[in-house]
Image: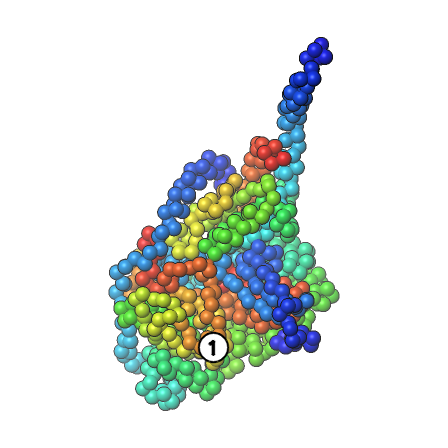
Amino acid sequence: MIKDLVTPENANVFVGKLGDILEKAIDKPLGYAINWGRIWSLWPVHIETACCSVEFGAASSPRYDVERFGIIEAFGSLRQCDLVVVQGTITRKMAPRLRLVYDQMPEPKYVIAMGACAITGGLYFDSYNVLPGIDGVIPVDVYVPGCPPRPETLIQGCMLLQEKIKRMKARKFV
Amino acid sequence: MTNELPPGLALQKVDERIMTLNVGPQHPGSGHMRIIVQIDGDYIVACDPDPGYVHRGEEKMAEYRNYITNIPHLERPVIHDSCNVLYPYVLGAEELLGIEVPERAKYVRVIASELNRCIYIMYWLAIYGIFLGHSTMFMWPAGDRELLIDLMEKMTGARVTHAHFVPGGVRNDLPPNFEDVCLRQVNYFEKRIKEYAAVFYDNPILIARTQDTGVLSRQDAIRYGTTGSVLRASGVDYDLRKKEPYDVYDELDIHTNVMKEGDSYARSRIPWLDMIESCNIIRQALQKMPKSGSVRTKLKPNPKGKGLDSVYKRVESGRGSLGCYIVSDGKPEPYRVKLSVPSFRNLIALPNLLRGEKLGNMPSVYWSLNYWPVEADR
Amino acid sequence: MHAASGEDQEDEGQEVCMMSSDTATTAEKKPVAKAPPPKPAAKKPEPEPVELPVFEKGISDKIVEKFGDKIEVAFVKEDRVRINVGKEDVHDVAEFVRDELSYDHVESVSGVDYPQDNEIEVVYHIGSYSDSSLARQVLVLATRAQRETNPIPGNDATKLPTLRDVFYSVEFHEREIFEMFGVFFEGHPDNRRLLLPEDWADLPPLRKDFAIKGR
Ligand code: SF4
């Protein structure tokens, strides 16, 4: 019966269909596996932009230890990173550099905006040199409010990001 | 050794060999600034610091807010030393507005600012450790720091940004039973930081990396106008808590730590000695503090200065002397506020210290300057 | 832990609102002609206080003795002496203060803009490490530069002689004043921009006629 279905003329179509079916079958588990891998090895870029970096440092201190949630505080190269934690105020001088850093990172990449300054400009809403939030420069995944956010808040922001990654389509980037 | 190039560097056609390197702003060893270094082989021939990545215009903003609403944003340059960075502003505002401070508030201020100094130095030490590749020295200070942060949180209600000092005193009285808890924590803290000597300061690798690098001579330290630990590591005995005591520092017995060497090692050791001294000061202040009384003079709403006046106050912060120049024109807002910050003053030493050093010594020299970029940029 | 659940919903709204406000603010920094604040009198005649601190009086007397009426002692307070001097003499006074009175470093250089007088004041706070009797003292040396209504930083009349050859420590401070007020320091070896972005093309931001947004 199969022989009747697969004639030399439509063999290609059939193989293509088969591929689609196969893909459908393993897409979910594969995506899940890929995302699972991403969740537990988020590497933040080492870019400090303002005073929130103090609490970012505190978050990886022994008391809060963000590493147990898979946010690896590592001073690696930009090309190995997949997370930007924007730690506070972005000034007009820093904004092009932030964009440059973001553009150089490989896909997939995620952004956490930490602190009131990174979200809206915060205390510096009327300063002449501060951007009113970073979402005009790079797309943001998670906002972590506070001035500065406590390390617990930052950790929760990271977990929210992990939740979000879990629900993301993995294949967009495969 | 610092100011002269090592022999062999003074080649004729040096241009082709020189490479320009941008360190920062995205770099593990730079913090929020860029340092443009020119290297010949492994030696630095020129260095041009490029700060300003966190320039937020604090001074301009201060002209639009009144004396009280200026408090929260003026402490942001150094949030982990926020009591000290506000201190000169508050002292200056008190002089301009003619406000008396209750005795107990002065002691509370001293305690808060010494605790803050320790918190700042611990953070700096953690960063210094990690940039020298000493992970233990990140973990220990970053963990022990939380002890004092707990104390400050009890006292002011916030982890790092306290906004605790106001013209006329401090915002809140101490919580009940604070003295005992503070004494216990500070004693334990002192015991802990004394252990750092074994793991960090007597560590032969640290000594090899920092001794005789970036030597700042006494004359140069004075000529560059450096301040704080950088100055005292070069053998100048200058501490404002002793030389120009503000609030109740003249009633406390303070010892100034001075070292003669002027190298990175001395510069990294002085803050640590300062912390031990701070513990002493806190104990003395706890003992001498009046047990009760008001901590805050009631202010009129929107206090004003009396006509054209200017005042320059300075305090010793975790990094050195921090000045605040306030010009008032008799309105509720200051006419001009200028923060003269120690980081910015110490920055001028950087190009001179790095010239002739090996590139690998850059982190140890740069961070030994006790530099906090956000403060320098304001 | 207050960050919790509100965040996800807020994302969209914030993004939209931020975008629009960003575009709106790009054009915000026009020099708005703002009513100048009622002015601090330029050189107010100082009523002689009854009892001047002795040591500080000694310092100001030495300077007065040398320069006579080229300078003006604005006040003598405890630990603070303020000298106003014209821009022709500021270099000489600084040299005298360094060589004869053993002040050795500048702590801070601040600019203050006085649009009513058409002048920009530059204030040097000078201290001393090497002389322990001067450790408490700060000598305030103030001078004034002409102010331009339409400044072209570096190419107009807003100029002062630099003190960098007298006090090495003013190097970065004077660079900061140049970008923040447009006061060009003649003879300064390195008058580049320091803190502001490279492409800053507006008025120097700390001048009073530079208004920040929404104010
Ligand atoms: S949110 Fe607050 S702590 Fe964070 S960068 Fe802004 S001012 Fe600093």
C1 in relation to B194, above or below: above
Question: Depth check: B304 or B114 in front?
Answer: B304
Q: Position of residue B293 (x, y in %)?
A: 42, 60
Circle 1 crowding by C-alpha within 10 Å: few under 14, some 14–19, many from 20: many
Disc 1 is attached to a residue of which chain?
C
Label 1: which secondary element? loop
Identified at 68% across, 13% down, the residue is A5
B59 in relation to A164, above or below: below
For disc 1, the marked residue is C164
From the viewer's perspective, tell me whether residue B127 is left or right of residue A86. right
Identified at 32% across, 70% down, the residue is C147
Q: Position of residue A158 (x, y in %)?
A: 57, 41
Q: Position of residue B194 (x, y in %)?
A: 66, 63
For residue C79, say whether it is visible.
no
For residue A125, say whether it is visible.
yes
B2 in relation to C203, above or below: below
Identify the image quadrant of the C terminus of chain C: bottom left
Question: Depth check: B109 or B313 in front?
Answer: B313
Identified at 36% across, 51% down, the residue is C27
Image quadrant where residue A18 sits:
top right
Identified at 64% across, 68% down, the residue is B16
From the viewer's perspective, tell me whether residue B219 is left or right of residue C151. right
Q: Position of residue B336 (x, y in %)?
A: 36, 65
Image quadrant where residue B349 sits:
bottom right
Q: The residue under label 1 is which amino acid type?
A: Arg
Question: Depth check: A75 or A60 in front?
Answer: A75
From the viewer's perspective, tell me whether residue A26 is left or right of residue A140. right
